[in-house]
Amino acid sequence: MITLRQMSAPRWTAVFLLLAALCCLFVPAVTVKHENFKKCDQSGFCKRNRQFADDVSASSSWTSPYVLDPASITFEKGQLNAIVLKAVKEGEEKARLPLTVTFLDSGVARVTLDEEKRAKGEINLRHDSKARKERYNEAGKWALVGGLKVFEGAALNAEAEQGYTKVVYGKGGKHQAVIRHSPFGIEFQRDGETHVKFNERGFLNVEHWRAKIEKAKEEEKKEGEEEKKEEEKKEETQGEDESTWWEESFGGNTDSKPRGPEAVALDISFPGYEHVFGIPEHATRLSLKTTKGGDNAYDEPYRLYNADVFEYEMDSPMTLYGAIPFMQAHRKGSTVGVFWLNAAETWIDVTKKKNTANPLALGLKGHTDTQTHWMSESGLLDVFVFLGPTPQDLARQYGELTGYTAMPQSFAIAYHQCRWNYVTDEDVKDVDRRFDKFNIPYDVIWLDIEYTQEKKYFTWDPLTFVNPDKMQKQLAKRERKLVAIIDPHIKNTDNYPVIDELKKKDLAVKNKDGNQYEGWCWPGSSMWIDCFNPAAIDWWKGLFKYDSFKGTAPNTFIWNDMNEPSVFNGPETTMPKDNLHHGNWEHRDVHNINGMTFHNATYQAITERKKGELRRPFVLTRAFYSGSQRSAAMWTGDNLAEWAHLEASLPMVLNQGISGFPFAGADVGGFFGNPSKELLTRWYQAGIYYPFFRGHAHIDTRRREPYIAGAPYTEIITQALRLRYQLLPAWYTAFHEASTTGAPIVRPNFYVHPEDDNGFAVDDQLYIGSTGLLAKPVTKEGATSVSVYLADSQPYYDYFDYTTYHGAGHHTVPAPLEKIPLLMQGGHIIPRRDRPRRSSGLMKHDPFTLVVVLDKDGNADGTLYLDDGETFDYQQGAFIHRRFNFDGVRQVLTSTNLDTSSRTVKCEKYLKSMEKVRVEKIIIVGAPSAWKNKAEVTVMEEGRKESKRKQSFPLEYHAAEGKKAAWVVVRDPKAWIGRGWRIDFGDKAAGHEHHGHEH
Ligand SMILES: *[C@@H]1O[C@H](CO)[C@@H](O)[C@H](O)[C@H]1NC(C)=O
């Protein structure tokens, strides 16, 4: 939450209401402050590298100055080492760039390029800087947690022709890296075909270290501004443009750049791939548009430089709050990708090259290549190459490297109610009571910065939050939680022990001179904790102990905002790049990782609030990087209450999912501005499909809790919330899948149907996990229907009335305001809990409904994952993992165990606690007409006495009507959720024992 205006905290509801009333009089002109943020040509290295690319492209005689020295090659245990020489000026020594290419067990290859002079510290820093001399080489330390096992089977291909080195790698030797020596470049092949090319276009650029040639002092003094410019121009004509090498100013801040120019850049091409996805966070489409010419192109590269870009604009490559430099390219039958492991400011150009069909080459169709150009300000060149071939492979391999999504507490995937701000503890309790009064489910209420005493974190305002304990107790009665905000800026003031300790222990980020950096944020003058420092993390953990942060309770969790970091008076609203972090790394080097170190520290702090209390933390973060998924959820920051923002939230959330950080959502209702009742309602109907589902609003907006809108909106919003709660078992199962395989929680069409060319760019509808549930939220004002794209020939059924949609292509699905367009793809079994409750915590022992949705052959399959939703006991086997299957030939529905681990004590205990939880209803959609006269089914359960094993239960048959499919219901079949069972729907069921066994 942010505006630059400093709001004084409205302490009394009256003031608040007055404010709210006043606000309605104005329609604020909201738009992003472009002048606060750099364009490529205002960011020296981006301008230089883009210009370089243009010059290279324009020249016919030019060749890349990078040559691999073949004599330097060594190859051992899955790793190739060599020196790449960069030709510098005539007569000057070439720059030596150590290259490593590592071939990993997973089939992924990693390429790093360093610079010898900097690595050895043989450079001089200007301005007496204390910064490190090396290129930043610790991004992996924060981002990577595994997947680095080397594939020792990788082997040099002896048949490589002169001038090339080839390495065969990957399981079964399917992959090959073809390393060209002169000019240096690499092609990555799978099954003999090239999928990824490095330096195809010659944009590789490692800005080697050089000393600044200082002009004599006297001369400089005499020089007027005019002359200086003349001088620069002269230098330019002599060769490279030095104007941004040594110093850069933007918005009144000057970056001292003690190491001079040090960018790394590389072109990466995906031949034959028309679509590229990923590199969040941008408010753009899933299939990335081009940035340098082409239809409807952007005129700026995609930027990754975590920043507080409030009121951000739609359809833009502008940077936002988080950065995941992972891109995937997709075409029919193949997905490949690259992960550019660099934490500095990064820009990426995307262009497409159409290759028209050659009429002479029979059978060769025209195709499109996607070409990308990656530019980072500093650090190593460090790139992982993924060769797929499926989107699922990429999700798994990227997840092996950066970690899978943490399994959240079950409350965290239910509904969160937030606003800036609930103004008093009584206000919180009142909102809580109203949700109950209107029978609207919710799990978590949130406190923004105003709960603190004068923006001092770890304190409560004694006038407005008089009794936080009592407030938490009321929430806990219905198993509800509180999330309180804690930001990384610490108020620089007297009589505040937190800042005293931060200073005394010297744990703050430093300025370029090595003194504690002081900037401006919510509290006014502030300092920033440096979570790159292990001692800072240890100290941070102590602050969250219950006896330290008084007024918090086991049901209090934390929101980390402003961690890009946002600095109101800093360049681009963030820290100066020449600030110093632990180990004397410049802020420039670590910027995009900064937010992750902070929310990770908070995550650890929440696990250790009390000895012996081991529960999964919940932390929401605004800034993020690759790896953030291991310890946080994210939201898309400060959006607007406009239809366009609702629409943009879907591709953004989908993109988070395929980029390894799926626990994502957007502020429901829009943060800035007042949504119309229709927009608010539609936003809730869409928000129930965000993995992270929170309503939030700016301090200047009117109250908009779901009970406020009135008829018919409140009722419609309540229905949407109930739908989310009903499907929580399906969501939780999807989270489990994400946490074990890296699969997205909500999935775009291309991920589910990777062979369907027509659906690759579809990003306005989504699948929930592996459930076959296909949602198409309404994002247009006044809409009464939506067009849903179906990729395959399975029947799709309306979730509510079983209307059938058949056939690949677009289908019109009715969507009046009260209707949520949601279809079920045939072939799935969806677990639900149908009893409306006030919070998810109250549903823990509720029975289940299974919706069996038959495919065109009469089969269906599904899974359910369950655990206590709270502790880490699931890691010791305390969970239930079932597979449900309906076999259309045998006409048998079975529940079998997917848990192959041995039964632990924790497991037995958990199963015992779930012993009485049963399946209370089975619905079969698309039921065969042969069941019309069927009166009962037979249920057999594992582990019961023979005499009692078999029981019969009535079956209700509902005939098909018009387009609505036939369905049957079996009520309360005494099938326990934690056990194996079999329900026989076949003709011979009565009295006839089938063979086959379940357990
Ligand atoms: C998160 O915390 C863990 C535990 O201390 C640590 O090993 C890891 O490096 C941290 N990761 C980040 C990204 O800060």
Image (spheres, rainbow, N blue to C red):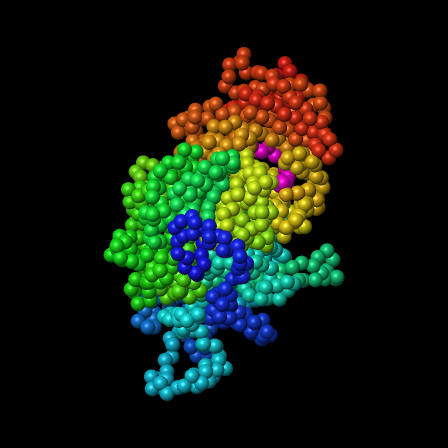
Quadrant for the N terminus in the image? bottom left
* Residue 27 image point, x, y percent: 55, 58
Q: Magenta part of the protein: which range?
A: 818-831
Q: Is residue 645 visible?
A: yes
Q: Would residue 590 appear left or right of 666 to someone viewing this image?
A: left
Q: Is residue 67 visible?
A: no
* 165 relative to 913, above or below: below
Residue at (38, 59) in percent of width and height:
521
* 935 relative to 577, above or below: above
* 954 relative to 868, above or below: above
Residue at (70, 32) in percent of width and height:
965
* Residue 385 image point, x, y percent: 51, 55
* Residue 16 image point, x, y percent: 44, 51
Image quadrant in which you'd find residue 766? top right
Q: Is residue 820 located in the magenta-colored stretch of the structure?
A: yes
* 295 relative to 704, above or below: below
